[in-house]
């Protein structure tokens, strides 16, 4: 057989084909869910039933709500508004504080005491009813009643308080001063009473607290007023004693002493004396300048001289004398008596004038000396007065301190007196809140929502079941469809054989006994593929193997051999000498000599082969099981036997052991022109099958014509439902397990032949 020459043209027929692209992830997920839908449904139903039992066992919860309006109460103890606003905070903080007060433990404890909830059957463990499951369990199976552990009253009250606080809820109404006060309880009457009682306790507690605060404030203000009054009297008495001791006079609210008044007068007189001295000194300086020049005319021209009335009269008299002298000189001679008399009068007047000017000059000098003396005297008096004033100033600090103490004590006394009057008459405690809508007896339970519990439980169960299904699909490494064969194993799916439900017929003879079954159609498709894979090769050796036992390789080998025997002289060789079963399946004699005797040369070929019943197939059994079958098939004698078998038969089908168990198939693959690797659908892990195919390729590729996979025992109904369409030959015939018509077989065979011709 010229395998090498046909290798390039024939090997491509068994190469992986480009089938349809893999489905999108969403489609695969939907197919996975469709596959596990009944399991998912059972899980959801079971969880729903358990959730229903649990929900039906829950006690109903009743809720009642009271609407309370919280007002902005501002109790002020002092009148400083800025300090109050900085302390009280914003409006939002105020309401949040009030809400926390309503939910406080103090009010809850008071509520428990007022309503005596420690004795209520809802909270008293000594009055607790039997558990919910007691109605379904017989009394003999219930545990015996254990003596209840009696807790102390404090512990019981604390426990009940915690339960009450857990049942209270507040819901502020947006943009209002209203708040919804609700309480949840298994007792509807208790659910109604608790919100109303808690609201009243909140209002009463606030009134009591503010009333107590007002009483404490009044007492404090009265005590402080008495103390401040005493301090004010003491400070006023000390101030008055100091004024009297230091002779301090208060004029129009201003304290003035004698030294200060005297200093003010002396300073005023000194200023006046200084002005006079300066004026006298100016006149004196003018006179001295004129006297130093010895000029009478300058002396007479001085303002102080001219302003003198006596000098003025003498000036007038001198002018009159000069006029008379002038007249006399015009009428008389120098010696005339009238002339002499006029000149004598003029001289006398001038002498008097000089005398009077001298008197004025002396008067200016005396006035200057007197002014200077007065100024010096006043300076000394002012110095003495300043010493006395400084002594007073030192006392003035003590005076100011005493006055400040008096003013401060008076202001505090007036403030506390006024506030005490306001507190006594004006700050009447008013309610900080009022109930708008009282809580009413609930008409029905508000929870638990059994539908939601069951629905959520079923949704969670559905999500968990779907997740488990998707996880199982991801963990499932088996091969399920022909498409997965070609995508995961990278080898062409030569054929797909459906799972057959047989009652009496042997599956190894199914092709002969039920020639029109879907299984027979699948065998014909495999036969067509093998025939078209090497048209130029007149002889064929087909090796059938698998990864693991019980994958159906013997079934495939027997039925394929029956199919080839219809058109060619075919020999079925049982090379699985460790677990032979062909003789038992085909009705042969297990003691007949077979392959081991033929290879050993003890029995000729015509005694080892025999025709199968009701067919043209020749069978070569395994014969006696040798000690080491691998050494037998690896010998030169076995090669010679295979050569003789190829010469005697057109087609030789070899049934070999599983590849994962022993390596006999690797040795036998050297003599095969085509290899069929049987993979059990939904059972064989694809990594295991892929490893076996890789070994086959590595060992047999130089002389191999075709390597393909047969997907065996495929559940067609399951594959159609869960995996959709698949690329296996005759797949559409496997939708039901009835017989197909001959016309359909011929159409399928013609399609396979046309495809093979195109490839070749």
Image (tube, rainbow, N blue to C red):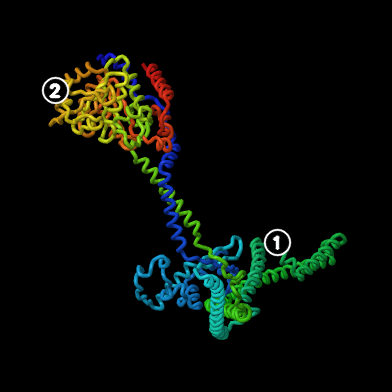
- Direction from residue 166 to residue 406 in the image, left or right: right
Residue 408 is situated, as x and y percent measured from the top left of the image, at: 56, 77
Query: Which residue is nearer to you in this view: 569 or 86?
Result: 569
Query: Which residue is nearer to you in this view: 344 or 572?
Result: 572
10 Å crowding of disc 1: few (<14), some (14-19), many (20+): some
Query: Which residue is nearer to you in this view: 307 or 314?
Result: 307
Q: Residue tagged by mark 2?
A: 603
Kind of element beneath mark 1: helix
Of callouts 1 and 2, the N-terminal one: 1
The reply to whether discs 1 and 2 touch (Cβ–Cβ < 8 Å) is: no
Residue 158, quarter of picture: bottom left
Kind of element beneath mark 2: loop
What residue lies at 22% left-to-right and 21% top-to-bottom? Answer: 671
Q: Residue tagged by mark 1?
A: 298
Residue 73 is situated, as x and y percent measured from the top left of the image, at: 59, 71
Residue 225, quarter of picture: bottom right
- Direction from residue 759 to residue 375 in the image, left or right: right
Cα separation, mark 1 vs mark 2, equals 191 Å
Residue 331 is situated, as x and y percent measured from the top left of the image, at: 88, 61
> Is 150 situated above or below 717?
below
């Amino acid at each position: 057989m010229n395998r090498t020459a046909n290798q390039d043209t024939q090997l491509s027929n068994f190469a992986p084909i480009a089938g349809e692209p893999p489905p999108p992830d969403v489609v695969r997920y939907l197919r996975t869910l469709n596959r596990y839908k009944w399991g998912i449904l059972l899980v959801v139903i079971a969880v729903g039933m358990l959730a229903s039992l649990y929900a039906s066992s829950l006690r109903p919860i009743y809720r009642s709500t009271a609407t309370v309006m919280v007002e902005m109460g501002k109790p002020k103890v002092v009148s400083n508004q800025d300090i109050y606003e900085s302390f009280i905070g914003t409006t939002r903080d105020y309401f949040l504080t009030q809400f926390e007060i309503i939910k406080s433990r103090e009010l809850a404890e008071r509520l428990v005491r007022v309503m005596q909830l420690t004795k209520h059957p809802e909270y008293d463990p000594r009055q607790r009813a039997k558990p919910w499951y007691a109605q379904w369990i017989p009394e003999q199976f219930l545990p015996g009643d254990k003596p209840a552990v009696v807790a102390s009253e404090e512990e019981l009250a604390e426990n009940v308080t915690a339960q009450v606080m857990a049942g209270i809820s507040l819901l502020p109404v947006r943009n209002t001063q209203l708040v919804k006060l609700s309480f949840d309880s298994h007792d509807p009457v208790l659910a109604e009473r608790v919100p109303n009682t808690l609201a009243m306790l909140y209002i009463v507690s606030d009134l009591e607290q503010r009333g107590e605060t007002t009483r404490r404030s009044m007492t404090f203000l009265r005590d402080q007023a008495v103390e401040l009054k005493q301090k004010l009297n003491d400070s006023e008495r000390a101030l008055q004693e100091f004024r009297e001791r230091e002779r301090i006079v208060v004029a129009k609210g201003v304290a003035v002493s004698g030294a200060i008044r005297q200093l003010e007068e002396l300073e005023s007189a000194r200023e006046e004396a200084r002005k006079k001295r300066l004026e006298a000194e100016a006149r004196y300086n003018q006179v001295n300048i004129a006297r130093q020049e010895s000029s009478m005319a300058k002396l007479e021209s001085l303002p102080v001289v001219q302003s003198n009335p006596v000098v003025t009269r003498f000036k007038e008299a001198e002018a009159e004398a000069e006029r008379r002298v002038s007249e006399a000189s015009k009428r008389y001679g120098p010696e005339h008596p009238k002339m002499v008399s006029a000149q004598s009068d003029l001289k006398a007047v001038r002498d008097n004038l000089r005398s009077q000017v001298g008197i004025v000059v002396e008067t200016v000098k005396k006035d200057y000396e007197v002014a200077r003396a007065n100024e010096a005297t006043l300076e000394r008096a002012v110095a003495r007065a300043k010493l006395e004033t400084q002594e007073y100033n030192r006392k003035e600090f003590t005076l100011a301190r005493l006055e400040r103490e008096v003013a401060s004590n008076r202001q505090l006394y007036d403030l506390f007196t006024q506030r005490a009057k306001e507190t006594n008459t004006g700050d009447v405690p008013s309610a900080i809140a009022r109930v708008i809508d009282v809580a009413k007896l609930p008409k029905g339970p508000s929870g638990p929502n059994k539908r939601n519990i069951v629905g959520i439980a079923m949704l969670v169960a559905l999500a968990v079941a779907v997740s488990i299904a998707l996880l199982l699909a991801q963990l499932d490494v088996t091969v399920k469809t022909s498409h997965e064969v070609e995508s995961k194993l990278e080898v062409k799916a030569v054929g797909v054989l459906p799972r057959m439900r047989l009652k009496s017929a042997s599956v190894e003879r199914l092709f002969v006994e039920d020639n029109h079954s879907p299984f027979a159609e699948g065998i014909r498709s495999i036969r067509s593929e093998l025939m078209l894979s090497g048209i130029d090769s007149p002889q064929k050796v087909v090796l059938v193997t698998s990864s693991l036992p019980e994958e159906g390789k013997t079934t495939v080998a027997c039925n394929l051999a029956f199919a080839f025997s219809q058109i060619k002289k075919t020999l079925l060789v049982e090379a699985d000498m460790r677990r032979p079963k062909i003789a038992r399946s085909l009705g042969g004699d297990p003691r007949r000599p077979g392959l081991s005797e033929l290879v050993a040369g003890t029995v000729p070929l015509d005694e080892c082969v025999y025709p199968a019943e009701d067919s043209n197939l020749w069978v070569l059994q395994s014969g006696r099981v040798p000690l080491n079958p691998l050494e037998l098939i690896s010998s030169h004698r076995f090669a010679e036997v295979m050569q003789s078998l190829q010469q005697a038969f057109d087609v030789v089908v070899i049934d070999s052991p599983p590849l994962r168990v022993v390596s006999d198939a690797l040795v036998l693959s050297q003599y095969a022109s085509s290899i069929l690797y049987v993979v059990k659908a939904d059972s064989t892990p694809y990594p295991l099958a892929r490893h076996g195919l890789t070994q086959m390729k590595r060992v047999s590729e130089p002389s191999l014509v075709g390597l393909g996979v047969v997907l065996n025992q495929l559940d067609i109904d399951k594959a159609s439902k869960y995996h959709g369409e698949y690329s296996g030959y005759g797949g559409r015939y496997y939708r039901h397990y009835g017989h197909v018509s001959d016309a359909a077989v011929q159409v399928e065979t013609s399609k396979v032949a046309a495809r093979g011709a195109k490839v070749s």
